Image (tube, rainbow, N blue to C red):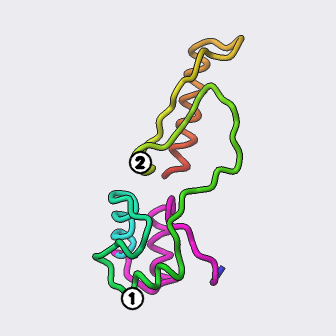
Amino acid sequence: MAGERVNLLGLPRAELEAFVATRLGAKPFRARQLMKWIYRRGAADFAAMTDLSQDFRSQLDAAARIAVPEIVAEQASHVIARPLSRGFAWQLVWKGVPPAGQQAWEFQNAAIRAYKRLASIAE
């Protein structure tokens, strides 16, 4: 794991703080700075993070990356979930009518369960 670059996108705050402290030897406030750059400003390049020291940015470039997860499979569904505003929220879209034999309320409950699963993944 020492040579592997860690993807910081989607890393929970506690894990990001641990990564910054153990792997980079920096203080926890650096993790908060990184989160602001990644999630508020949408930065995908460490060089753009101008309020971080140049040494820290080079350490980050060697040990970490910011990458959107790769799509490994696609499935046809009547409920489509997609991220909005850099991962802060998810949007569920109903596409067409509920599948045959499924009532509208069952379809809505399935959509809500899907949203809750996605929300727990994003946290």
In the foreground, 117 or 7: 7
**Which range is magenta?**
3-29
Q: Secondary structure at mark 1?
A: helix
Tag 2 residue: 88
Residue under the point 38% across and 59% down:
42
The residue sitting at 47% across, 69% down in the picture is: 16
Residue at the disc numbered 1: 55
The residue under label 1 is which amino acid type? Asp
Report crowding for label 1: few under 14, some 14 to 19, many 20 or more residues within 10 A (C-alpha): few
Residue 25 against residue 50 in the figure, above or below? below
Q: Is residue 19 magenta?
A: yes
User: Looking at the image, which residue is at 59% across and 56% down?
Assistant: 69
SS class, disc 2:
loop
Q: Marks 1 and 2: CB-CB under 8 Å?
A: no
Is residue 76 toward the left or the right of residue 115 in the image? right
Give the image location of residue 39, x and y in percent. Answer: 38, 58
Q: Position of residue 76 (x, y in %)?
A: 69, 31
